[in-house]
Amino acid sequence: MAIFVVKRNGFKEEFIPEKIVVSCLKAGATLEAARKIAKIVEAKLLEQNINEVTAKDLTKMILDMLKKENEEWYRNWIIFDRAVKKRKTEEELAKS
């Protein structure tokens, strides 16, 4: 079963766990932690039989786990989103 991510611009793309790994690594996570987070997210989506997830919901799932693993990695992700992607991720997630 394919899972699709509904991006912020409305486009859909296939869910690729490796993208979670790369994003977590950019935030400073170890490869082991990044892979673990990606596997847990994928497993949650599969067990809930979800075939579509919004980028926002996916980000929330990842950030919740990242924060539990290491507060600094979580902060790095937030800072990266603000500086590079011009997003206010924390504020967006607080509204949902």
Image (tube, rainbow, N blue to C red):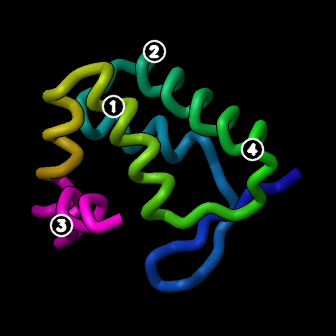
Q: Earlier in the sequence, mark 1 or mark 4?
A: 4
Q: Earlier in the sequence, mark 4 or mark 2?
A: 2
Is residue 52 found inside the magenta-colored segment of the image?
no
Residue corresponding to mark 4: 48
Q: Earlier in the sequence, mark 3 or mark 2?
A: 2
Q: Earlier in the sequence, mark 1 or mark 3?
A: 1
Stretch in magenta: 80-96
Distance CA(mark 1)–CA(mark 3): 17 Å
Q: Which residue sits furthest bottom?
A: 10
Q: Mark 1: few, some, or many residues within 10 Å (few <14, many ≥20)?
A: many
User: Which label was assigned to residue 66?
Assistant: 1
Does residue 60 lie above or below 14 as drawn?
Answer: above
User: Which label was assigned to residue 32?
Assistant: 2
Distance CA(mark 1)–CA(mark 2): 12 Å
Location of residue 23 (image quadrant)? top left
Q: Which residue sits furthest right?
A: 1
Does residue 92 lie above or below 74 as drawn?
Answer: below
Q: Earlier in the sequence, mark 3 or mark 4?
A: 4
Residue 53 lies, in percent from the top left, at: 62, 61
Does residue 9 lie above or below 20 as drawn?
Answer: below
Q: Earlier in the sequence, mark 1 or mark 2?
A: 2
Q: Please name the predominant secondary structure of the magenta segment in the image.
A: helix
Q: 84 or 4, which is in the foreground?
A: 4
Q: Which residue sits furthest top?
A: 32
